[in-house]
Image (cartoon, grey):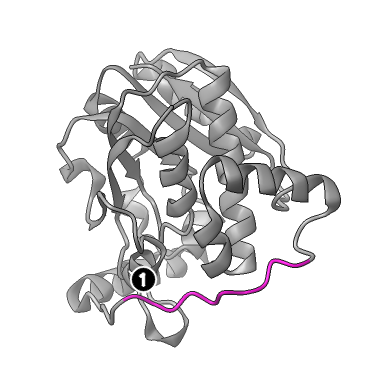
Amino acid sequence: MPMLGWLRNAVDYRIRQTIRLRRGPARLPRETKAGLFIVAAAAEAERLVAAYHLEQWRETAGRVDFATSLSYLQMLERALREARVTLPAQLRVLDAGCGDWFYVQTLYGLLQHFGAAKPRGIRLDGVEFDAYALYAGFRSRHDWAAAYMNGLAGARYIPGDICDYREPVNVAFMLFPFLFANDDMLRWGLPRRYLRPPVVLKHVAGLVEPGGVLILANLGEAERQEQHRLLAEAGLEVAWWGQAESLLSASDRPRFVTVVCP
C-alpha cells in the first residue's frame, strides 16, 4: 500500500540523515560513445560538445549520463535563446534540487559560454535535499556529485533544505521538481511531508535578483499545468515556455521548460 511506502521513506530518510555516508568521489565509467546516437542526433551532440567545450565530459561520462546531460543542455540552451536571456559576465547561479548532479558539466558549460565572447566567471551552487541517498556499491548521492563536479571551479554541492539557502543569484534552476505526492516521489524515497511546491517556488524565486531569471523544467503535461498554476498563484509571469523535443535521450513523457523573470 502507498501508505506503507511513505512510512518507509520517512524512516529511511531519517537514517540517511543520521549516518550521512560519504566515501569520496565515485569513479566515472568512461564508457565508449560509439553508436550512442543516430546520425541526426550525433551531429547535434558534436555541435553541443564543441560549443560548450565538453570534450573531457565526453571522455569520462557513462553513456546514459552523457546522452541525458546533452538533452538537458539542448533544452536549456533553447530556453535561453527563445526567451532572449542575456547573462552577465559574472554569474551567481542556484540549481535547486540537483539530485546527484549528473548534468553539472553541461550546465556549467552552458552558463560559461552561452552568448559569451570569453568564458564567464561562475559560482554555481547545487542544493540537494536528499544528498545521502545510497547508490550501488554503497556510494552516496553526494559521492557521485563529487565525481561529476570534478574540475569545475566555483561549483559547490550543498546538502540540505533549499529553504535554508539564502544567497542572492542571477540565475536559478528548478529542473523537474516534485509537484505531486505520486509514484515518482515515492520511488525516489522522499518523505511526503516535505512536499511543499508553493513554498519552495516562492523561496527560490525570491532569491533571483532584479534582471535575473528562473528556469523550470517539468515532466508531462499535468506537471506543466500545475507548475504554471503555482507560478500564477505566486504572481510570477511566464516569459516563455515550450516543449523540449530531442533525439539525444529517450523519454516516455514530454518535457517542458519555462522561463520566468521574477
Q: Residue placed farthest to the front in the image?
A: 118
| Location of residue 33 with respect to 163 vertically, above or below | below
Magenta stretch, overall SS? loop
| Location of residue 23 with respect to 32 vertically, above or below | below
In depth, the one of 198 and 56 nearer the eye is 56
- The quarter of the image holding the C terminus is top left
Q: Which residue is mark 1?
A: 133
Residue 14 at x, y = what percent? 24, 70
Residue 223 at x, y = what percent? 56, 36
Q: Residue placed farthest to the bottom in the image?
A: 137
Residue 59 at x, y = what percent? 56, 67
Would residue 51 appear left or right of 259 to someone viewing this image?
Answer: right
Would residue 40 appear left or right of 252 to someone viewing this image?
Answer: right
Give the residue drawn at x 30%, y 70%: 132
Tell me the quarter of the picture where residue 234 sits: top left
Q: Specify the segment rendered in magenta.
A: 25-34
Q: Is residue 225 visible?
A: no
Give the residue drawn at x 49%, y 44%: 176
Please tell me how many numbered marks the rendered image carries.
1
Q: Is residue 245 visible?
A: yes
Residue 123 at x, y = what percent? 25, 42
Would residue 132 appear left or right of 118 to someone viewing this image?
Answer: left
Q: What amino acid is at disc 1? A: Ala
In depth, the one of 55 and 239 nearer the eye is 55
Q: Residue placed farthest to the right in the image?
A: 39
- Disc 1 crowd, CA 10 A, few/some/many (<14, 14-19, 20+): many
Would residue 164 appear left or right of 205 to someone viewing this image?
Answer: left
Q: Is residue 254 magenta?
A: no
Give the residue drawn at x 56%, y 52%: 69
